[in-house]
Amino acid sequence: MKKFLLAAFVALMLTVTAFAVSADDFNFNDAAKTEELVAYLEEKAPEAGTKNINITDFKISSDNTLDLYQLCIDEAPLLFQFKQIVVVKDAHNEYITHIRFLYKDGYDHESYVKDVETCKAKAGELLYGIKDNDSLDTVTKALLLYDRLAMICRYDNESVAAGVVEFGSDTMYGPFIKGKAICTGYTGAYMYLLREIGVDSRTVRSKDGEVTVHAWLVVTMNGIEYHADLTYDDSEPDVQGRMAHDYFLISSARLNSLGQNKIYHKHNFELTDTRYEDKYWKNSETQIVFADGFIYFINNRIEKERGIYLVDPADPTYTPVKLIDLTDYWIKSKVGNSYEAYANYHCLSTDGNVIFYSTPRNIYAYDLTKGTTRVICAPVITGEYDNIYGFRYDNGDLVYSIHYAPNFGDSDINDVFNDEDFQIREKYDPDAAPTPNKTPVIDVPDPGTDPDDSVITVYFTDVKKNHWYFGAVEYALVKGYMNGMSKTTFAPNGNIKREQFVLILANIAGVNTDNYKNVSSGMTDVPTGQWYSGAVAWAVEKGYVSGMTLTTFGRGRDITRAQLARLFYVYAEKNGIDVKGRAELSSFADKAKVQDWMYDGLSWAVDAGIINGMEIGGKLSLDPNGSAIRAQCAVMLQKFDVYRGK
C-alpha cells in the first residue's frame, strides 16, 4: 500500500500578526517569483549551513510564513534533510528577513553539501543523452526520465511496515542515494529532473483530515497541466526492469478511475486534457529506452500486438513500428495436458548501442548497428515453472531475477518480497558466448494465432513461419551471419551483392573487419574506409576471393549461385574442412552450363548437401549463373554449419 503519514515541522520564532498586503509583496501564486526564490534558497543553503539566509529583498509577508515553509518542502527538492525551518522577521513583525534550516538529528552541514553533489551527479547520469538532445520533444524527455528514475528506485516498504520514515526516504536523497523512497522522495527527484529539462511541476498532497497520506506531481506540458504519479507506476513489490505508465500525463478523470483508494488521490481541482492518455507508453510494463536516435518499447498488454516497437521521436503522432515479435509465455502450472500461463513479463533495457530484452528463460541483445539479435544470457533454471521475471542492464551488468511467480510471493500465503532477494548480477561481455540453458523451454502456442501466419520471432515482417526459408533465416540472424535490409524487413527475395557475401563470410569466420577497414585490397573499385572495405581486404588477403579482373573486384554486382558455392568451397578447403566429396551433376538439366572453374565448388556443395538444386521449367536445375537470393543464402549458411559440425 503506497501511502505514508507525513509529519511536518515548522518553528515560528515570532508571533504572526496580520498586516495589509502591499502590491510589492511576494506573491506565492506567481510562478516566476517562486522559481526565483527556490533557486536562491537552493544556491545559498549549501553555503550557509545553519546560518541565516537573507531573504529581505523578496518582501515575504509574515502572513505567508506557512506558505514559505510549504514551498521549501514541496517545490525545492535540493532542500532536503532538514527537520526545521526557522524564520526571522523584521522589528515590526511585518516581513520575513531571514530563513535558517536546521538539519535532522545525526546529520550535519558537511554531509549535506556532499549529498547535494552526489544527488546532482546521479541526476546527471539519468539526464545524459536526454537533457540537451534537440531531437527529443519535451514529452519524450519527461517519459524517458520517468522510466530511468523508476529503474534506480524502489518503494520503501520498510518505512511503511515500521510506521516511521527511514532517513532520507521522504526526499530526493532517497531515490538518488539510497535507491528507495516513499511518495515525496519520488516527487522530489522527478521534480528536479523535470526542472533540468525546463518543465514546470508542482507537488500535490492528498490529505486525510490534516494528515498527508500521499503526494504526486502535476506537470505542465505546453501550458497544460497533467497528473504524474511515479510512486504508483513503479512496480511493488519491486521487480527489476518492470514498471507501468498508467499515471503518466493523465487527467483527473483518468486518475480517479484507476481504482486506488480515493483518499490517496484527493484533489480540489480538475485537469481535463486527455491527449496523452492512449499513447504507446500506456501498454508498456517495462522501461522505455532511447538508443540510436529512436525510442524503443515493449507492448506487454495487448496480446495480439505483443512485441518490441520503435518510435521515431521526430514523428509528432508517436506512431510505433513493430521491430521484434514476442510470443513467449511465463508458465504457471500444468493441468492435464494443458499449461496455465501468467501474462507476459518481457523487460527491456539498453546500453545505448544494443537493446536488451528478456524472455522466460533467456536474455537477448539486438544490435542496433548490425540489425542482429542473439542470446547473451541463458541461465540454468532448475525449477520447472521458474522463469526470468525481472531484468535490466545496469552499468555493464546484467541484473535479473528468477522466481516461480511474477510478484515474488505465493498468493496462497500472501507472502511478498522485493526481487533483490532473488537477484543475479553478472558482467555483460558483448563478445562472449552464453552458457547454454539446460532447461527446455515449454512452448505454449497462442490459441488465437495461426502458427503458419506468425511473423518471425526475431523481428522481420516479411519472414513468416510458413515460408520455406523461415528456420534458416532465423538461424542466420541469431548466429549473426546476416542482418536485415532495414529495421523491419529482411528482403528474402533480394539479390546478394559480392561485397555483401564477403562480409557474411567474415561473419562466419568471426573476423572483426574493422581491423582491415583501412587496408587496401588492391582492387580499384573497393576504396578503403567503406562498410565492405575491411571484409574484401580480409578475403583477398586470405585467398578466399579474387577479382572479376586483375584489378577490379566487381563491387555492386550480384553474386551467382556458382560463385557462392565456389566461395564456400575455397573457405572450407583453406580452413582444413574436408572437401574431397564430389557429386555427379548429370541429373541436373542445365549441367552443360557448369564451366570448369565452377565444377569443384558446385559438385562438392551438392555432395555436402549445401546445394540441392531448384526446379526451373519443371526440371531440376543448378542455375549456376543465376543470382543468389538472400533466402537461399540463409539456407546454405545453415547447411554449411551442419556440414562443418558447427
Image (tube, rainbow, N blue to C red):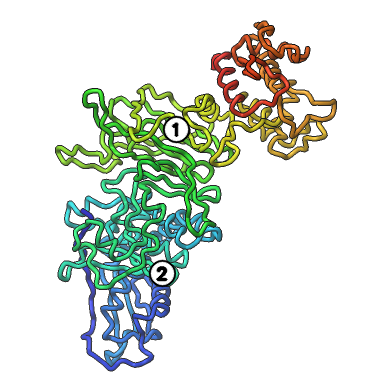
Measured from the top left, where is residue 530 in percent x and y? 72, 39
- Please state which of residues 494 and 172 is positioned toward the viewer in this rendering: 494
- Who comes first in sequence, dot 2 or dot 1? 2
Residue 582 showing in the rendered view? no
Counting from the top left corner in percent of width and height, residue 497 is at 70, 31
The relative height of residue 217 versus residue 485 in the rendered view (above or below) is below
Residue closest to the far right = 550
Residue type marked 1: Asp
Say whether residue 440 is left or right of residue 543: left
Where does the C terminus fall, quadrant-wise?
A: top right
Q: Residue at x 52, y 50 (%)?
A: 294
Horizontal side, residue 610 vs residue 428: left or right: right
Q: Is residue 226 above or below residue 394?
A: below
Task: Say the numbered circle drawn on residue 200.
Answer: 2
Instruction: Name above or below for residue 204 compared with residue 360.
Output: below
Kind of element beneath mark 1? helix
How many numbered badges does the structure rendering display?
A: 2
Q: Which of the two marks, 2 or 1, is nearer to us in this view? A: 1
Query: Residue 582 at what x, y percent from top left?
Result: 67, 6
Please give the name of the residue rendered at 42% of the width and 43% of the height, measured from the top-left corner: 348
Give the CA separation, mark 2 to mark 1. Answer: 48 Å
User: Residue 632: percent from the left, percent from the top?
Assistant: 60, 24
Whether residue 407 is situated above or below residue 340 in the rendered picture: below
Instruction: Tell me if 283 is positioned left or right of 628 in this view.
Output: left
> Circle 2 — which element?
loop
Amino acid type assigned to the residue bearing label 2 in the image:
Asp
Tag 2–tag 1 contact (CB < 8 Å): no
| Residue ID at (35%, 66%) | 226
Q: Which quadrant holds residue 551?
A: top right
Q: Which residue is mark 1?
A: 453
